[in-house]
Image: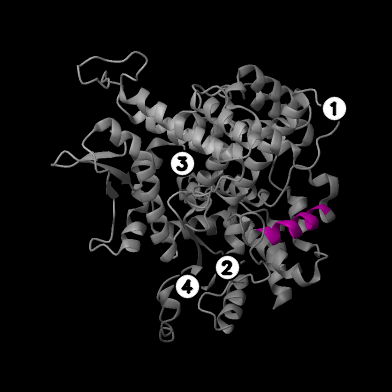
């Protein structure tokens, strides 16, 4: 039975189970020899099962308090984490959800309490679930009586509605979900989830025919008080239609994705039978494609645009060099802007033989090996983004200068682009560069640059690779291209059976062949001229 344990002497005890992810924390707090602690037990001093059930709630709460005190003494968060109920409603929902779980985990087998003569009283619980529900409801009534009249009535009504699955406010569920998501996804995605939920609250205000524009904070209050049971397919469809009048199709799709993810969690938590947002995105991709044609589809830079950006002068004087250099690296490495801006001393690969003594006059140790830059797991967008990219001689001087300056600081792992401090919702170094490059691109290309952004350098890299392959650069295969740009290959043989890492010389040949046979001659000249001017 949930939270109960019977000893060999038939005496009942309350048993508080510690979540698996907190075993070590609790073990350290209690100083156990094994370093972990899986549960705590307290004797209920009775052999009667029904009496043990009545005493269980208070005993479990006492055990939980004992654990939290020990955790606090050792500087660790309590068992429930950082979340705390902030209102009477949240407290009632939290208590009811916990009670609901206890009841569901209890036995539904027929086991009535009998009188001394063996008879069973009418209207007396006939199984553990019924008995536990009666006990927990009485506990809720006791809590409500300890509050003032208005709060007590609100607490008890919310508790019972939640326990019965009639009207569970969204607020506590949203808080629990966001707390869970924040351990798995980026801050940027959490921020998007919050924006979507706020927009859904604004819709609920509009859908309820409330007059005027909602006041600051009102949308959040409306959302948090809204019962999860009232969100059905009809309401979900009305939200989609309402938000489509205000946002582009891609944005609508992302909003629906956030709500679908939240409701998947709600269903898994047992607070909803189905997900009303499933299938609600149908047709949005086609609409997004039509809208993209009007706006201008994302594309690579043209040759004329590349020449304009390579020869232009950014108006951010103290950042102009950084903007020009990151742009050039992007063109010839295919790396993302944050991957480049996050480069540090230990992410630069210098061939070992370049540190060795030079061969005697007339001797040769073969062609010069290319330098490289590493994209590590903490920076890469996906698992496939972790890679090492060779540096073409046209952009290697950029890294050489940056590496020398970084080493001169004496810092163990100094950044190569200190002008790009971490920023934005996800605290990324590419955040600063992104803002300044956007201004530079608009200043140079104006409206003619529609459909381009820094990611267009990756599109150019892909175009250069394909062009070079068509012109005889045999190393620029689709699989090598995927490895260099950090994508999963679409072919099963390459994705599943081929080696995850090829010989470095193959990547070198691909980069050299790409520039030689895939980059327009005018662009190569502009890249070369910029380094000659600097020297």
In the image, the segment drawn in magenta is 431-442
Tag 1 secondary structure: loop
Mark 3 crowd level (few <14, some 14–19, many ≥20, 10 Å Cα): some
Mark 1 crowd level (few <14, some 14–19, many ≥20, 10 Å Cα): few
Q: Nearer the viewer, residue 189 or 341?
A: 189
Q: From mark 1 to mark 3, how far is it between C-alphas?
A: 54 Å
Nearer to us of marks 1 and 2 is 1
Residue shown at the point (69%, 24%) measured from the top left: 240
Residue 502 appears anywhere in the view: no
Say whether residue 18 is magenta: no
Instruction: Classify 32 as above or below 62.
Output: below
Q: From mark 2 to mark 3, how far is it between C-alphas?
A: 28 Å
How far across and down, in percent of the image, does residue 405 sit?
61, 80
Q: Is residue 359 left or right of residue 238?
A: left
Disc number at residue 523?
none
Please identify the quarter of the rendering in which residue 411 is found.
bottom right
Q: Which residue is mark 2?
A: 393
Instruction: Classify 64 as above or below 144.
Output: below
Q: From mark 1 to mark 4, how far is it between C-alphas?
A: 66 Å
Q: From mark 4 to mark 3, how far is it between C-alphas?
A: 28 Å
Q: Which residue is mark 1?
A: 211
The tag earlier along the polypeptide, 4 or 2, is 4
Q: Nearer the viewer, residue 95 or 497?
A: 95
Q: Which residue is mark 4?
A: 350
Report if the CB atoms under discs 1 and 2 are less than 8 Å apart: no
Residue shown at the point (62%, 59%) measured from the top left: 427
Q: From mark 4 to mark 2, how far is it between C-alphas?
A: 13 Å
As drawn, the residue found furthest toward the front would be 117
Q: How many marks?
A: 4
């Amino acid at each position: 039975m949930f939270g109960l344990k019977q000893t060999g002497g038939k005496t009942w005890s309350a048993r508080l189970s510690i979540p698996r992810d907190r075993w070590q924390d609790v073990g350290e707090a209690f100083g156990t020899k094994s370093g972990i602690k899986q549960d705590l037990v307290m004797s209920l001093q009775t052999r009667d099962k029904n009496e043990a059930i009545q005493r269980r709630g208070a005993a479990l709460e006492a055990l939980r308090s004992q654990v939290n005190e020990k955790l606090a003494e050792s500087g660790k968060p309590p068992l429930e984490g950082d979340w705390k109920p902030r209102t009477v409603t949240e407290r009632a929902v939290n208590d009811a959800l916990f009670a609901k779980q206890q009841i569901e985990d209890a036995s539904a087998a027929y086991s009535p309490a009998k009188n001394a003569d063996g008879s069973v009283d009418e209207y007396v619980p006939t199984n553990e679930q019924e008995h536990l529900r009666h006990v927990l409801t009485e506990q809720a009534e006791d809590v409500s009586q300890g509050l003032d009249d208005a709060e007590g009535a609100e607490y008890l009504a919310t508790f019972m509605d939640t326990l019965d699955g009639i009207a569970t406010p969204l607020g506590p569920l949203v808080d629990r979900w966001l707390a869970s998501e924040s351990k798995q996804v980026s801050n940027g995605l959490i921020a998007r989830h919050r924006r979507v939920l706020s927009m859904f609250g604004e819709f609920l205000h509009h859908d309820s025919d409330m007059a005027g524009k909602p006041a600051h904070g009102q949308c959040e209050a409306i959302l948090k008080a809204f019962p999860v049971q009232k969100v059905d397919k009809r309401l979900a469809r009305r939200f989609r239609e309402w938000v489509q009048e205000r946002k582009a199709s891609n944005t609508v799709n992302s909003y629906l994705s956030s709500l679908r993810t939240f409701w998947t969690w709600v269903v898994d938590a047992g607070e909803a039978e189905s997900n009303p947002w499933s299938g609600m995105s149908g047709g949005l991709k086609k609409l997004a494609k039509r809208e993209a044609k009007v706006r201008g589809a994302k594309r690579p830079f043209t040759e004329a645009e590349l020449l304009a950006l390579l020869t232009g002068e950014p108006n951010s004087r103290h950042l102009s060099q950084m903007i020009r250099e990151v742009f050039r690296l992007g063109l010839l490495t295919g790396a993302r802007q944050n991957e480049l801006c996050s480069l540090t001393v230990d992410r630069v690969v210098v061939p070992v033989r370049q540190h060795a003594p030079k061969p005697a006059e007339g001797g040769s140790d073969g062609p010069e090996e290319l330098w490289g830059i590493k994209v590590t797991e903490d920076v890469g967008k996906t698992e496939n983004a972790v890679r090492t990219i060779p540096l073409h001689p046209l952009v290697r001087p950029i890294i050489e200068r940056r590496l020398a300056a970084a080493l001169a600081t004496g810092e163990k792992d100094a950044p190569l682009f200190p002008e790009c401090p971490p920023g934005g919702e996800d605290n990324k170094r590419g955040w600063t560069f992104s803002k300044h490059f956007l201004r530079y691109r608009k200043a140079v290309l104006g409206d003619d640059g529609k459909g381009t952004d820094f990611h267009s350098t990756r599109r150019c890299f892909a175009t250069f690779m394909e062009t070079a392959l068509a012109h005889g650069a045999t190393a620029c295969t689709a699989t090598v291209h995927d490895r260099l740009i950090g994508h999963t290959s679409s072919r099963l043989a390459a994705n599943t059976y081929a080696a995850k890492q090829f010989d470095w010389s193959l990547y070198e040949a691909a980069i050299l062949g790409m520039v030689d046979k895939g980059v327009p001659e005018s662009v190569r000249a502009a890249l070369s001229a910029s380094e000659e001017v600097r020297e």
